[in-house]
Image (spheres, rainbow, N blue to C red):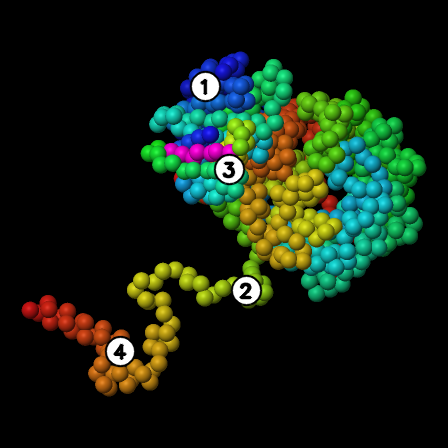
Amino acid sequence: MRELRFHRELYRGESVDEAIKVYAPYATITPVEHETHWVVKIESKSAARERKIGDEMANYALGLTIRNQGV
Amino acid sequence: MQLLELRNELDRTSQAFFRFRRIGPDRTLITNLEGRWLVLSDVEMSAYARGAVEKESALEKRLRDHNFLREGWDEAAAREMIANRKRFLGYGPNLHVMVLTLRCNETCVYCHASPAPVSAQGLDMTEEIAERSVDLAFQSTSPSITIEFQGGEPLLRFDLLKHIVAYAKAKNETAGKTVEFTMVSNLALMNEEILAFMLENKVQICTSIDGPKALHDKQRKLPMHSAFDSATHWIRTINQAYVDRGLDPNLYHVEALLTTTRAALARPRDVVDTYRELGCRAIFLRPLDPFGMAGKTAKVTEYPRSEYQQFYREAVDYILELNQQGEQMIERYASIFLTKILHGEDPNFLDLRSPAGAGVAMLAYGYDGNVYTCDEGRMLAAQGDASFCIGNVNESRYRDLVGHPTVRAMVIASNLDAQPGCVNCTYNPYCGIQTTHNHKTQGSIFGRMRESNVCAVHMGIQDYLFGKLADGEPHVLESFDRWTTVRPREHFLHET
Amino acid sequence: MSTIEGIPADVAHVDLDEKRAVLELDATLYPVESLYSAAFVFIDRHYVFLDRPDAQKLRIVVTPKKLEADPEAAKEQLRGVVGELANELVTAAWRHQITQENRARIEAVTLQAMAGSMGPPSLDDLEDFDFTDEAFEDPLGIALSWEEKYAKKGEAKAEASEGTADSPETSDAAEATAEAKGEEE
């Protein structure tokens, strides 16, 4: 299982949500409540796959956040 | 004198806004917002910076006359000069590049255009797309437009070229613009019939000459014969045809362009002599750029820009020697910069203005009807990067194209007053950025100028020119002044 | 984790096991906008992750999508990434400052360039323009044409004669009268 922590001051919540939706078909992605971060748990067939999906999701969320002019 | 030593002693109350740069021992160049300039000695610079310029001295007069003093600063004059430099902002695209085909009969080691073989299918512009492209070009807010035929090799579609010329001329009967046509060609497919058409319809002709024959043929290959022989035969023939028509050969001739590759760097004089022997009065010492094939063959063709600077200086020194001996010849890069430096005019060379011309002063129409902000944009698209595609002739309106968010982004990114480095650079009034080059080499249209080859070239050329201006040799100043004299080539203008 | 030659370990280091480089930045030196700007330049060739370990710090984790197999070459590649990213961050931070200082000038030139090339709209452009869009909010209802304001003249007259509704003038007058009475009292 891989855990991503997107800081709320650096990533838009909507962008993280959108990234979750896009990558949901490829892994089990579970958002978790946290005070300072948007936390996302990723479970898939292998650690390598979890890593790849997590990396792509992180870029996607960052890209969307930047496109929407930040937090 | 170390300029840094002055930092703590700067007066900051007597100077109007200025930027400065060391250009040699005992020489500091200062420029102001409107692009006036002076070269000061160390003593003069120290006095100026410290606010200790002697009243009624020669230095004070020079500084006041050039608007470098806060007391009596002539705002109206500064404003007028800036407005004059930015006059081009009032008009839309005047240069419209039309890519008639991607096919080409020549293989060039640094080709920007990612060409296809002559036998390739589906890579030619149709008449419908051509007409629609001309329609859009005529909607430009510019009162004058230039339609530039490019490829691949545009003469592979001479039929389409003729059609576009006829269509545009007919359209101009009512549009009333000033129209010019130019063609960029390797000339290998030129013949008497084509030449007759070009002359009759006043199509200007540009080609490439990379230097002496062996050098040229090594990097530009035709299947059956020498690319150099082919091009030079037609350069001479066309130039003679202009003379036969009573046109001044100093003004009317084939424009030959150089792409400086590594092989040319050691031979600046040979390159200039090649142009002289062809009767070419102008040479444009263009460095390599990273588009198309040049990116792939960089290992063979590329070089550090410091080596280009050395080549440039030697070549232009040689041209100045020739001028002194009575032989007319100019270097185009220098002429563009000098027009801005000496006359406060902008010759509107689209890569050397702020903001750059991509999308607002030029458009490129691909063979498939896709429209790009500039020629480099369509070259990038040919390599799979469509970042600079702003529409299609069949779907997009004129205002949608020139008002595209990509165009707006490029205008902002190429504004020197928004760019780290450039904002403080002494050459700010005269310089320009190429956003597609930034995108290709540094990953964003903004780029980082300190690491940019384009910046290195521009800065190096201006260092050289200002050094020459500071030296003040009369024959050099006379040449520089002549290089900035613009004589319009009215023969090529189509007006109604 | 290993250090990068010439760079303090608490500023940047590489992790060859995780195949990434990490930069720690002083948050007071780099506005978030510059962080985004610099990060965005890298996301086509790298995976970029941002974090804020505390209020004073920013962290960037950069993982090349393709890393050299040889450990020494990989380390050199990551060192290059750190250097490029650091340069981009400085540039972006300064650009952010310049843009704020020169905003008026930049906007003026951009507007002039775009307006100069776009020119006035053509009839086709105007035909497509959606004039039904509300141009602005109008809470007081004052942006009305005469017809909209006094719609259905016949109905209005009929209502007035029955005394069931005031015309705008009479209701205004009634309000003014009520106010005046209130003041007198």
Query: Which mark is nearer the camera, 3 or 2?
Result: 3
Query: Crowding at label 4, few (<14), some or many (≥20) Cα neighbours within 10 Å?
Result: few
- Mark 4 residue element: loop
Residue annotated with mark 4: C167
**Disc 1 vs disc 3: Cβ atoms closer than 8 Å?**
no
Residue annotated with mark 1: C11
Instruction: Specify the subunit that label 1 lies on.
Output: C
Quarter of the figure with residue B179: bottom right
Residue annotated with mark 2: C128
Q: Residue furthest front?
A: A45
Query: Crowding at label 1, few (<14), some or many (≥20) Cα neighbours within 10 Å?
Result: some
Point out residue B445 in the picture as x, y percentages from the top left corner: 58, 37
Tell me which numbered mark, 4 or 1, is placed earlier along the sequence: 1
**Disc 4 vs disc 1: Cβ atoms closer than 8 Å?**
no
Point out residue B223 in the picture as x, y percentages from the top left corner: 90, 37
**Disc 3 vs disc 2: Cβ atoms closer than 8 Å?**
no
Q: Are marks 3 and 2 on the same chain?
A: no
Q: Which residues are magenta?
A: A37-44
**Residue placed at 80% from the left, 58% from the top?**
B163
User: Secondary structure of the magenta portion, mostly?
Assistant: strand
Q: Amino acid at mark 1?
A: Val
